[in-house]
Each structure stands twice: as C-alpha cells, then as structure tokens.
Image (cartoon, rainbow, N blue to C red):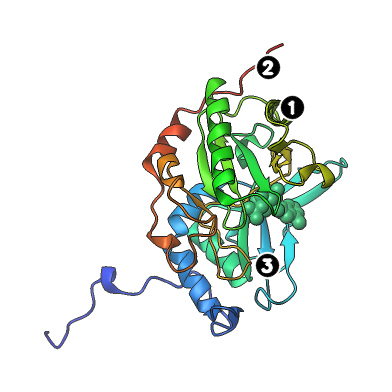
C-alpha cells in the first residue's frame, strides 16, 4: 500500500440505515437470538421482504421485551417511526380517517426492526390502488387433530380447484401451524367482490368435503377439520409476508415455496432465522405475478 492509500468509496461502510439500540437484548430466549441477530437477518433478506411488503399498508407485531414479553399488533402509524416509514391517511370501516403506514425501502424496514417489529403483515393491495386487491389469501388453519400431511393435501386441493377457475397460486409456509395459498390478481375488482368470491370458494370446498373442510369461524364446527380462513380477503385484513420472522419459539419464518417441494417439507415452521435467508424467491412466483389474471366473474 502506498502511504497515501485511501479505501475506494466502494469499500467504505455505507451510511448506517438506522442506529440500532439494545443490540444484545435477547428477543428469542429459547434460542438466545438477540436484537442484533434479528436486525442482521432482516438486512440479509431485505430484498425479499420488500418484494412482499413495499408499497403496501402494514400491520406489525412489536415485541419490545422479546417474544416472552408483551406484544403489540400495530396498524396505525406511531410516534418514533422515522421518515423512512411513510404515513397514509385512509378511511376505516367505521368511516373515520386514520393514519396507516407503509415502507418502500430497506431504510424503512430496518427502522421498523429497530422499533422492535418482529412480524410483517401486508395488505392484499398496494397503496396506489388501495381499493383493488392484487392478492387473495386462503389461510389453512388446521384443528389440532389434523396432521401436517393433511394440511399439505388440502393446499394442493385448493390449488387445483383455483386452477379450474383460471387462478394460479403458490404455497406459503406460515411459520406457524398452517399454509397459505396465495393467488396473485390483476388489481381490477374491489374488496367486496374479492371477499364475496373467497367466501363462496371456501363454502364450495366445505360442501364438497364437509368431513375435511369448514368455511366458517365457528370453533365447534372446526373440530377434526381444516378451517379455510378466507377472511384475510377483506379490506384492512392482512397476512404474514414471506421471510417475516414469527414471534414464536424457535424464530420460525414464513416462506413461499415451490409446489413440488411442499410435498417434501416436514413442518410449516421448517425454516427460521437460521436458514430462511438462504432461500431465494422461487422464479415461478415472479412469473405468476407478471401474468396475474383479474378476479373471475362468479358463475350461477
Ligand atoms: P398459523 O399457520 O399458525 O395459523 P398464521 O399467520 O396463518 O399462522 P392466523 O392466526 O391464522 O396465523 O392469522 C392469519 C393472519 O391474520 C395473520 O398472518 C395476520 O396477518 C392476521 N392476524 C393475526 N392476528 C391478528 C390480530 N390480532 N389482528 C389483526 N390481524 C391478525
Ligand atoms: Mn393461519
Ligand atoms: Mn387464520
């Protein structure tokens, strides 16, 4: 090195995105994962989390004292959010206005992580077309007596029934107990139409196989069955983003996978803070999004 050597700009550290406080705080006591490790995880999967959440209103689960402490499911913009977290006033169901929030870059994501956000739950529409959903979610919630292979079989059945209506889909491991079947849409129909379609679809599945599926919230009817939770498809409802960590033991992550791969996956919380970052966005998903059809018009 020459005495006047200086690091080239490319080798210099980038400007810090956010000042991380309490990096040594234990967030996941069961595995000893710290806030620094959660931060590093989200930095490494930031591109993929952003592909799922950028430009969508968000709900977040915040755990200021780690997952063993109190948790807050937050959908309204709060004090302390930095400028990288965008605010948006919208009409709520009761007709009143409220301030929601979204992010569109890595600075926004890391800002929320610094604010102890663990889980990221986006809307099924984008902020520039808030009233036109571009994702449908069928959230398969198994009764405790249902086995994982039965859940996987259900996801494949939903895929095939949706395909018969011209809708392609991908499976997302929830990182919890179930799978979400995700359907990309061209954003044309409104929320009422999407909700109506999803309710009818879940009802049709439950009429076809009443011993296996239920399309209503009623806990009693869910025993021994899989609840096809279609209520994720109402205006203001959310579902967890791919690569989001869950505030559950073991720091599992939600993750989209290939259909043929799903058959080999042994648990819905198979991936976690340890290995979800090694998973790319499956190429077929980008393709499905690019070719997404509008909501089919209901028949009959
Ligand atoms: P699992 O596979 O264990 O069911 P999940 O993410 O599907 O995991 P659910 O309880 O079925 O969990 O919830 C489905 C979605 O509903 C969540 O991903 C989240 O976006 C939303 N949700 C859950 N709890 C709340 C809540 N308290 N307030 C608002 N939305 C919620
Ligand atoms: Mn669920
Ligand atoms: Mn659910």
C-alpha span from label 2 to label 1: 9 Å
Q: Alpha-carbon distance for marks 3 and 2?
A: 39 Å
- Which mark is drawn over residue 132? none
Sooner in the amino-acid sequence: mark 3 or mark 2 = 3
Question: Which mark identifies residue 298?
Answer: 2
Whether the residues at callouts 2 and 1 have beta carbons within 8 Å, the answer is yes
For image coordinates 75% across by 36% down, the residue present is 215
Location of residue 172 in the rendering, given as x and y in whole percent from the top left corner: 53, 47
Residue 175 picture location, percent across and down:
57, 57
Of the 4 image quadrants, the one containing the C terminus is top right
Mark 2, secondary structure of its residue: loop
Instruction: Please give the residue where the numbered disc 1 appears in the rendered image.
Output: 196
Task: Report crowding for label 3: few under 14, some 14 to 19, many 20 or more residues within 10 A (C-alpha).
Answer: many
Which type of secondary structure does the marked residue at label 3 adopt?
strand
Front-most of 201 and 97? 201
Q: Is residue 246 above or below residue 56?
A: below
Q: Position of 40 compared to 78: left or right? A: left
Asked if the beta carbon under badge 3 is closer than 8 A to the nearest atom of ligand 1, the reply is no
* Mark earlier in primary sequence (2, 1): 1
Q: Is residue 101 visible?
A: no
Tell which of 201 and 105 is nearer to you.
201
Residue position for label 3: 62
Q: Position of residue 53 (x, y in %)?
A: 56, 50
């Amino acid at each position: 090195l020459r005495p006047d050597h200086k690091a080239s700009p490319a080798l210099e550290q980038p400007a810090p995105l956010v000042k991380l406080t309490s990096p040594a705080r234990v967030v996941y006591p069961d595995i000893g994962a710290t806030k620094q490790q959660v931060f590093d995880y989200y930095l490494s999967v930031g591109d993929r989390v952003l592909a799922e959440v950028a430009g969508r209103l968000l709900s977040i689960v915040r755990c200021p004292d780690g997952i063993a402490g109190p948790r807050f499911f937050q959908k309204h913009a709060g004090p302390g959010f930095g400028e990288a977290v965008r605010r948006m006033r919208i009409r709520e169901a009761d007709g009143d206005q409220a301030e929601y929030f979204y992010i569109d870059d890595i600075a926004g994501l890391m800002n929320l992580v610094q604010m102890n956000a663990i889980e990221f739950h986006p809307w099924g529409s984008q902020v520039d077309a808030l009233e036109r959903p571009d994702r449908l979610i069928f959230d398969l919630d198994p009764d405790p007596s249902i086995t994982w292979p039965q859940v996987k079989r259900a996801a494949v059945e939903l895929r095939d029934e949706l395909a018969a209506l011209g809708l392609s889909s991908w499976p997302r491991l929830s990182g919890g107990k179930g799978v979400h079947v995700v359907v990309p849409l061209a954003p044309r129909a409104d929320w009422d139409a999407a909700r109506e379609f999803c309710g009818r679809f879940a009802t049709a599945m439950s009429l076809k196989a009443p011993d296996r599926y239920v399309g209503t919230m009623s806990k009693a009817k869910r025993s021994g069955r899989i609840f096809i939770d279609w209520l994720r498809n109402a205006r203001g409802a959310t579902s967890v983003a791919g690569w989001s960590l869950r505030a559950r033991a073991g720091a599992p992550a939600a993750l989209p996978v290939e259909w043929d791969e799903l058959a080999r996956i042994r648990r819905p919380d198979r991936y976690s803070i340890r290995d979800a970052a090694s998973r790319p966005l499956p190429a077929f998903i980008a393709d499905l999004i690019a070719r997404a059809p509008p909501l089919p018009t209901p028949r009959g």
